Image: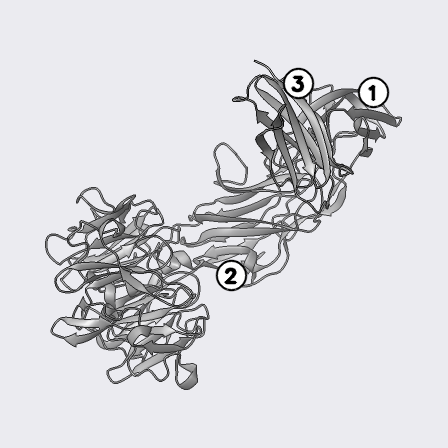
Amino acid sequence: MNPISRVSQIRDPMLLTHLAGRSFRFFRFQGRSLFFIGLLVVGFLAFPRLAQAQYAEQTGSDNPFDGLSATSTPAAVDALAGDFDTDGDVDLLAYDGSSELFFANDGSGTFSATTGSGNPFNGIVQTFGTRGRTFLRDVDSDGDLDVVPFDYTGSGTGTLGFVENTDGSTYARRTGTDNPFDGIAVSGNQSTVDAIMGDFDNDGDPDLLAYDGSSTHYYQNDTSGSGASFSETTGGANPFDGISQPFWTNTTTLVRDFDGDNVVELASRDGTGDATNWTYLDDTDTGYAVQSDDSHPLSDVAADATAKSVALVTGDFDLDGALDLITYHDGTQRYYDGDGAGSFVEETGSSTPFDGGAAVPALRVGANTFSQDMDGDADPDLTFSDVEADANGLRFVQRTNATLALTDGSSSGVDFTAEVSPGTSNNAIGVLRLSAGQTGATINEITVTNQAPGVAGISAARLFWSKDLDLDVGADTELDAQTTDADSAPASITFAGFHQSVPPTAHALIVAIDVETGASASGVRFELAQPEDLSILGAQVGSVNGNDKTSFSGLPLSNGSTDLPVEMASFEGTTTKAGVQLQWQTTSEAENVGFRVQRRERKVEAWTDLGFVDGRGTTSKPQHYRFTDREVPYATDSVRYRLEQVGTDGTTSYTAPVVVAREGPKQVRLVGTYPNPVRERAIIRYAVPQKRATTVTLQLFDVMGRRVRTVAGEVEDGRHELVMDVDGLSIGVYVLRLRAGHEVKTRKMTVMR
């Protein structure tokens, strides 16, 4: 492997850079309201199948490294790529045969030679030797990239240097005790080093595994606020304990998370055996263990290798969120598609993003190939040295983007009218159609904006992937789900955390909502507010509603705003000594059987039926109703209520919830236990006024005055209810004592069997 082929060693850089309406029903009586929102559909029109290739070599002025010089050998290139100035893009540090030159990236793939104070390495004569014996890691865990070069001294030995990034954009070479690698012996040569770095103990910082010419040593990173520090760890604390040779060299060992378990594995070649002769170390609960030839993720991956190099590079080349591989073997470039769980399958022809020959070769060996986003478009490009073509030049293989056409839901677009049914789940809410003439695009996030934030009745939203424009919950793939406040819809809803590849055939993204009726609002409409709200990798906008555009603002997802009529004249709740009294009024009713009263203490809980109030059937006169909840949960500070209206045809709809806040307790109170006498468990209720500046405790004593249990210590203010298990207590009389400062409340409790 060459662990410095990316800024992060645990994952590939690109994995870190993130990178038909429904039926309408109208109800005339109070409690049923029509809830219109809109439908968001992202449809991909079918096109004749084009070439699958998304990678192509760029030459001349289209190569951002054209004219740049970096010496190289077949095993490694004398250049480093990383975000050295901590501005979010990949820069280049190259040796041209006489001096090191720094090339700053402007964020779009234009590299400019920078000197003086603009060069983060200004004043350092030699930062590194060659890429094959240099590590780029955040060694001191301060959020920026440090450089760890192997300084070769001859005769197969050398030392590890430390070039620290001191402030995000300034480097200084540390020596002596300021170098955390001072005194660590390492063997190597002018092309590679017999050491690897990775987070081997899975604690978030890079550790060191080094061979000194006779044995392998493990050095744990002990970095703290005082600076970087490495200490040798042996025995059971060494995750490689008992493994005689866990790796070969830096340039022939890959340190990656191959199986998607968020812990790095090791795969190395020593240049002998056949092309699939990997030594693979998997992480286990007790450290690393060597896996057999046919049981690890690379067992069928073929790559040429020597004692100093391996022809393999990793990256998310198809933008599906999983690590992929490209290799060279027997003069043929090979592509292995990863599934993110440790399976790599070789793909050929149109199934590979390197099809067509425009991206062959895309690598030579790992230590002279960079798999990083050089042009700032959030996908991995390939940059490599090719001594056969140009001893000092860099070739650039760019991932090209598909062009997308957007069509919104307005009358100028697909002219979509939103229709949803009240009291149902998974109602679509808007439409946005996309068409693409080339595969390779991946959707990983979308945000829809609500033009009427605060409307009540939307309790959840989901994103589905469908082959057509009609939502089929059983057949379509749910990509993400978001819970929303049913009392007040958010200003926007974001769906993220997925990687959905877009095929050339027609597909759709459908956003669906769960609707609770009874909301009072108008002007409801959803839109795609700005380009940043649609995150697509491997593609760029080319047209909007048939017009050539690369940007947009405020794309409506339906052909007009929708009003949400409410026929309930009022619904409110107030606290009384008897509990909570609910009152509501209807303006008219049609075939109304009645109202089921429901309560919910917390938003995450299910609604509980409390009782049923008969309706007036069909009437055009206002009607008044009342219901008292006499069993309000003691410890709750606020309660939500709603009405489920039931029609003669069995259909139901719901009012918007009302929230009834209870006044806090005004005095210390200890309510009698229930049941009393108690045999197994007792329910204890007590109350403490707000802002009582003293410690409050609840304890249990026997009749002799001896404390037998502290039921609650350091009690907070408010109402409380708890269950106390009396197992272990002897039969008899006990006293519960609630003490709040100088105020004491007591209650007797009898335990029986």
Q: Measuring from the top left, give residue 98's x and y in whole percent.
A: 25, 85
Up/down of 638 relative to 555, above or below: above
When asked about the image quadrant of residue 593, the answer is top right
- Give, as a three-letter code, the residue at label 2: Gly
Indicate how the structure is coloured in the image: one colour
- Give, as a three-letter code, the residue at label 1: Arg
Asked whether 517 or 638 is in front, the reply is 638
Identify the mark nearer the N-term, 2 or 3.
2
| Number of other residues with Cα within 10 Å of mark 3, as a class: few under 14, some 14 to 19, many 20 or more | some
Up/down of 367 relative to 461, above or below: below
Left or right for 753, reference 650: left
Identify the mark nearer the N-term, 1 or 3.
1
* Contact flag, marks 2 and 3 (Cβ < 8 Å): no
Q: Which numbered marker is on residue 616?
A: 1
How many angstroms separate mark 1 from mark 3 (CA)?
44 Å
**Circle 2 SS class:** strand
Q: Measuring from the top left, give residue 24's x and y in whole percent.
A: 68, 33
Q: Provide the residue designation for mark 2.
A: 542
**Circle 3 SS class:** loop
Left or right for 580, reference 227: right
Q: Which residue is found at the position 35% from the left and 66% from the top?
A: 139
How many angstroms separate mark 2 from mark 3 (CA)?
75 Å
Left or right for 473, reference 359: right
